[in-house]
Amino acid sequence: MFELRWNPVIKWWVMVSSSRQNRPLLPKDSCPFCPGSPKVPEKYSVMIYPNDFPILALDPEKPTSKNKKLYKVARSYGKCEVVLYSSQHEQSFSSMPEKQLIKVIELWTERYRELGREKHIKYVFIFENKGEVVGVTIHHPHGQIYGYPFIPKKIQAELNSCRAYFKKNKRCLYCDIMEEEIKDSRRMVCENESFVAFVPFFAEYPYQVFVLLREHKLSLDEFNRKEKEDLAEILKRITKAYDRLFNMPFPYMMCFHQKPTDGKSYEYYHFHIEFYPPMRNEKTQKFNASSETGAWVHGNPTCPEEKAKELKEEIERG
């Protein structure tokens, strides 16, 4: 089964693919992304790898379910790709040279541009799941890209808020959030010439971090060379601080939020990255339970100002 199903209650699509149940748990001594594997070249730096278990496709099969008055179905148009950050199995953002990270950013930019040109792709979502607690089965450094045939609900909520805020105030909502965080300073984690990073006032996770571009730009496609270099530098600093916080490879979800690729104007939006680390401490996971999942009301068991201070201290240690 491979289809989109419409949820008439929240008015959004759900991606259904029963084949993803067959994803393997790989043995500890095997890696499909290391040189020597038949799945990748003998030598490579960064590369795109086609997802072996995609939930979206540019030529999807017809839905097996039938459209009804209440329940709609549609083809799962789109694309699922894996981004291999390095051929070296032990590398991660926190350990790889910034030059290598810039290559990853260049590849992200290229794929955002190319996938955005596809007729059915309305939003290009760049993300990384790191760590077994967020479901990672392959530990080789990699992220993913989904090209959705719709704008995801969270992104649409952000767009709606940004549009309403701009209409009322003639200003960008994220620019004002950034200005307020800089002014307050207690939740600031680090900054450079092009970016600021902070634990947001409204953080849902203990060590959640927002990374905002200082300039009002909408996507990676608009970045200049300096901004790409500074993005590499600040991503390395943040992930290194995560790893040093509890002296462990720190798990996280990293999500890129940028303008949709449906051809419409989104000048009121603002490029940013959101980190969601699911740990309270080195041994305790912060679970999304009934309130978060059933009511979409998050409860943060920690104080954002305190967690920002911890991260900032780790970054300042170098």
Image (spheres, rainbow, N blue to C red):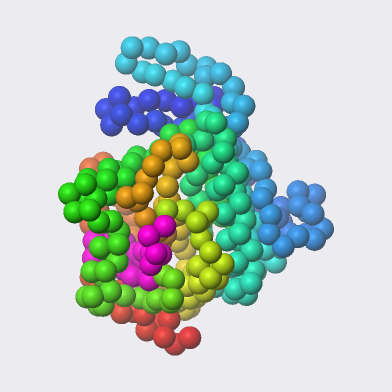
Hey, which residue is sitting farthest front in the picture?
170
Rendering coords of residue 51 (x, y %):
63, 43
The residue under the point 56% across, 67% down is: 225
Is residue 110 something one can see in this rendering? yes
The residue under the point 33% across, 55% down is: 287
Is residue 29 something one can see in this rendering? no
Q: Nearer the viewer, residue 99 or 176?
A: 176
Rendering coords of residue 104 (x, y %):
61, 61
Vertical arrangement, residue 131 with respect to residue 25, above or below = below
Q: Nearer the viewer, residue 251 or 317?
A: 317
Query: Is 141 covered by the magenta stretch?
Result: no
Rendering coords of residue 39 (x, y %):
76, 48
Q: Quadrant of residue 157?
A: top left
The residue under the point 62% across, 56% down is: 107
Query: Is 202 covered by the magenta stretch?
Result: yes
Residue 270 vs residue 169: left or right?
A: right
- Numbered range of the magenta stretch: 196-217
Rendering coords of residue 82 (x, y %):
61, 49
Hey, which residue is sitting farthest bottom in the picture?
317
The residue under the point 43% across, 34% down is: 150
Q: Quadrant of residue 156?
A: top left
Vertical arrangement, residue 279 with respect to residue 20, above or below = below
Q: Quadrant of the N terminus?
A: top right
